[in-house]
Amino acid sequence: MMRIALTLATAIVALAGCAPIPGGGDDGHGRNVPLARPNGPPRDCVPLGSIRESRVQDDWTIDFHDSGTRWYRVTLPQRCNGLGTYRAFKYETSLSELCSTDIITVMDFGGPGGGPRGSCGMGRFQPVEIGK
């Protein structure tokens, strides 16, 4: 019985990272997210070897820069609570690509008590031109 309760509690904590905040409040959309103009059709996956940089913009948005000049904006299908605060995530994949169906885990690297803060689903990779 204790094992079932612990498993259920772990599942609730993991899902809480994507849950909306009751009663409104902060919606997780950043005020300083650079504008992005779509530049081509969205992609389901990008090769891991081509990702040079990622920039977390807020709880909903991650920009990826490839090894060339292309940027991809991923708008998550659900809010990922804490992503905009901690601005760090990890992913695990057995493929050589990061895909819209993959799960990311928000990470807190800020000292004692740090670690994973919840997991959320990715979205499609929209090629964009990032505004200044």
Image: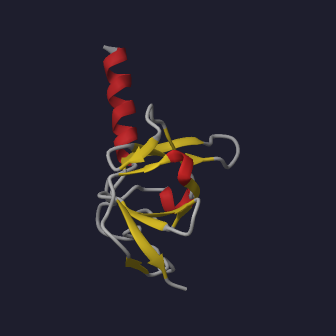
Quadrant of the rendered image containing residue 59: bottom left
Count of labels in the image = 0
Quadrant of the rendered image containing residue 41: bottom left
Q: Residue furthest front?
A: 68
Question: What residue sits 34% from the left and 50% below the top?
Answer: 100
- Give the quarter of the figure containing the C terminus: bottom right
Up-down relation of residue 1 to residue 111 (above or below) = above
Q: Nearer the viewer, residue 54 or 69?
A: 69
Question: What residue sits 35% from the left and 24% below the top?
Answer: 7
Question: What residue sits 70% from the left and 45% below the top?
Answer: 111
Residue 51 position, x and y percent, is 55, 54
Q: Is residue 29 visible?
A: no
Q: Is residue 87 left or right of residue 95?
A: right
Residue 30 position, x and y percent, is 46, 74
Residue 39 position, x and y percent, is 38, 75
Q: Nearer the viewer, residue 111 or 22?
A: 111
Q: Is residue 91 visible?
A: yes
